[in-house]
Image (spheres, rainbow, N blue to C red):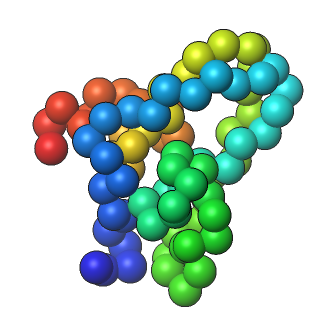
Amino acid sequence: MSDNIPVIAQKAPFPVEVTEGKTYFWCACGKSQKQPFCDGSHKDTGFQPQKWTAEKDGKVFFCGCKASQRQPLCDGSHNKL
């Protein structure tokens, strides 16, 4: 794998119930075993986790394919892979 191309964790979003004001760290490299969140697997890659804070309680859909233009959230890009 090239260090500038993320691993596709899955070709579907990850639905997650989030809590208002809580900060989440989305895995950008695709290597985390705790998808969609970072577990430190990006070490020695060109990737860093993306910090995201929930504006309200509810379900959001985190990108699983790592191709979304709205990262860390899904924009449907997985449908084009």
Which residue occupies 70% across, 25% down?
18
Which quadrant of the rendered structure holds the C terminus? Answer: top left
Which residue occupies 18% across, 32% down?
79
* Percent position of residue 68, x then y: 37, 40
* Percent position of residue 40, x then y: 64, 70
Which quadrant of the rendered structure holds the N terminus? Answer: bottom left
* Percent position of residue 70, x then y: 46, 34
Picture quadrant of residue 8: bottom left
Residue 54 relative to residue 71: left or right: right
For residue 31, above or below residue 67: below
* Percent position of residue 3, x then y: 38, 79
**Front position in the image: 24 or 50:** 24
In the current view of this chain or complex, which residue is farthest to the right? Answer: 21
Which residue occupies 37% across, 73% down?
4
**Front position in the image: 35 or 53:** 35
* Residue 70 visible here: no
Residue 40 relative to residue 31: left or right: right
* Residue 21 visible here: yes
